[in-house]
Each structure stands twice: as structure tokens, then as C-alpha cells.
Image: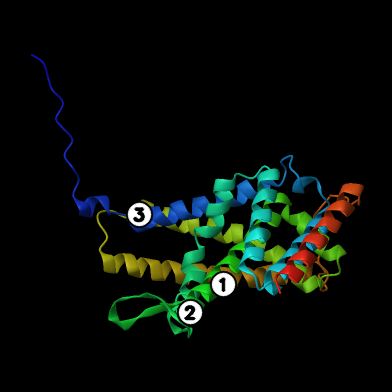
Amino acid sequence: MTSRAEPALPQPASVRRRNGMVERTLAGISQAMEHALFAEETARRAGLLQALDPRVKVLAMLALLIAVALSRSLAVIAGLYAVTLALAWASAIPLGFFIKRVWLFLPFFTGVIALPALFITPGPPLAQLPLGLAITRAGATTALFLLLRVSTSVSLAALLIFTTPWNDVLKALGVLRVPDAVILIFGMTYRYIYLLLRTANDMFLSRKSRVVGRLSGAEERRMIGASAGVLLGKSLHLSSEVYLAMQSRGYRSHSHTPSVATFVMRRRDWAALFIAALIAAAAIVLGR
């Protein structure tokens, strides 16, 4: 007599949605940590920008950012974006990951700001929409300028982070006479964001382990609000403890960057700095 396995019955939608918010939050936290670890990994690869002095990279990225901000030509800004992609490829950064890293979140922030410009900017109509709305040529150009500027600027900043260890970036800022308060804020923000992510991860894991049954939408919203409040309280308490610990150890407005790297300018560093300055100057002149 043979036994036949019963076919698996599809679960109701309410069961499939059980703890969906918690699982999505845990997945998001894990993904954020993986991206941070990936940035540290790519910063130690053998690539074009990884071999340059961090001071050169900071100055070069600053010059290119100024060129992007001052340029008034879409073609010039698009050319700078193409240069950024070429540098990412030469620095052993996967282009698919690099592009998605920037453009995945760009529509949610910059797109919301650029969207009204399509309709409220005066000019000849480009396309007619229902409800009497019209996209103007000037509005489309303005929105495209904003999106392209922001995407190029964010790509340049991401390129610096992906090719330079964070402690080396802070040390380079200190050598370039950036105020200690600014360096301290950058360093502590980067360092303690991991601690807050881990705290949030522990909170949601403990919550998930104690949830039995299905949560309604109202219960999920209450849990989100309570978790956000607890996490805010923990962060405020942590900031007070960190400040008191720094004061008790003799902190007097001078930050120490834990970097063992020794900065030495070589021929390739001077050449890279000259090329970056040349590209930035050409973009500013051509983009007028």
C-alpha cells in the first residue's frame, strides 16, 4: 500500500503577511550593514582610485563637485557623470551596484522636489496631461538639471567612500585643515550608526520572537511607533553616556583619527590632482 504526500495547501494572505513588517525591517537593517561592509571591502581592492593619496581624492572630488554645481550645460554634467562611471569601473567597483546605489533612492527624494517644476515652470507646453495639467519645456529642463546634478554629486561622494577607508578620509580632512568639530561629527556619526542599527536589529528580533499569531494593521503601526520611540530614547541616552565618557577621559575639543596610514605624495598623485583640476576647470568654462 503506497502512501502519497498530500499537496501543500496555499496559505491565506493573512498568514503570509504575519510579521511581514518585522521581517522587512530586519532585512533592511541587514542590507544596510552589508552595504557598509561592502564599501570597506572595495576600499581595499586594487584599483585606480584606491592607489591614490586620500588627500588627492578629497581635493579632486571637491573640485568636481564645484564644477557640477557651477555648470549650466546638461551635456557637461552628463560628461562628468560619465567620467564618474569610468572611474568607478577603473576602481573595480561593479557598475550595476554603483548605479543602483544612487538611482534607487533618487526618485524618492530628488524626484519629489523636481516633480512640481514640470508643471509650475512657465514656458511653452511639451506635453498635455489630464485635468488641465501641462509639462512645459522649461520645467522638463529644470527637473532634468536637478536630477542630473544630484545624481552626479551623489555618485562622486559615493566614489570617494567606496575607494577610501573612512578613517583615511577623516585623517585627510584633518590634514587639509577641516575644523575638528566637523571631523568629530563625521566620525561619530559613521561609528555609532552601526551601534544604532545593531540596537534596532536586536529590538526587532526580540519582538519577532515574542509575537504569536497574526498582527493587525493597527497593532503593526503601534509597534512601529513604540519601537521608534524606544530607539530614540536609547540614542539620546547613548549620546549622554558617550559625552560623559569623553569628558572623563580628558576630551577637550580635539579629535583623534584612528588611522595608521601614512600619506605620501607620489608622481601619480600629483598627476591625478592636475588632471582633476583640469577637468573641473574645463567643465566650468564649457558649462557657462
Q: What separation in Å lies between label 3 and label 2 (alpha carbons)?
A: 48 Å
CB atoms at circles 1 and 2 under 8 Å apart? Answer: yes
- Along the viewing direction, whichever of 22 and 59 lies nearer the viewer: 59
Which residue: 16% across, 26% down? 5
Mark seen at residue 146: 1
- Viewer-nearest of discs 1 and 3: 1
Secondary structure, mark 1, is: helix
Q: Is residue 161 left or right of residue 201?
A: right
CB atoms at circles 1 and 3 under 8 Å apart? Answer: no
Which residue: 84% across, 65% down? 174
Q: Is residue 35 left or right of residue 222?
A: right
| Residue under pointer 3 | 210
User: Residue 71: which quarter of the image?
Assistant: bottom right
Where residue 74 sits in the image (x, y, percent)? 61, 67
Q: Is residue 250 left or right of residue 198?
A: right
Q: How is the image coloured?
A: rainbow
Amino acid found under the numbered disc labelled 1: Leu
Of the two numbered discs 1 and 3 on the same chain, state the one appearing first in sequence.
1
Secondary structure, mark 2, is: helix
Where residue 79 sits in the image (x, y, percent)? 66, 59
Quarter of the picture holding the C terminus: bottom right
Of the two numbered discs 3 and 2 on the same chain, state the one appearing first in sequence.
2
User: Residue 189: which quarter of the image?
Assistant: bottom right
Structural crowding at the residue carrying mark 1, measured as other residues with C-alpha within 10 Å and reported as few (<14), some (14–19) or many (≥20): some
Furthest-left residue in this view: 1
| Residue under pointer 2 | 117
Q: Is residue 170 above or below residue 181?
A: above
Which residue: 91% across, 48% down? 267
Amino acid found under the numbered disc labelled 3: Arg
Of the two numbered discs 1 and 2 on the same chain, state the one appearing first in sequence.
2
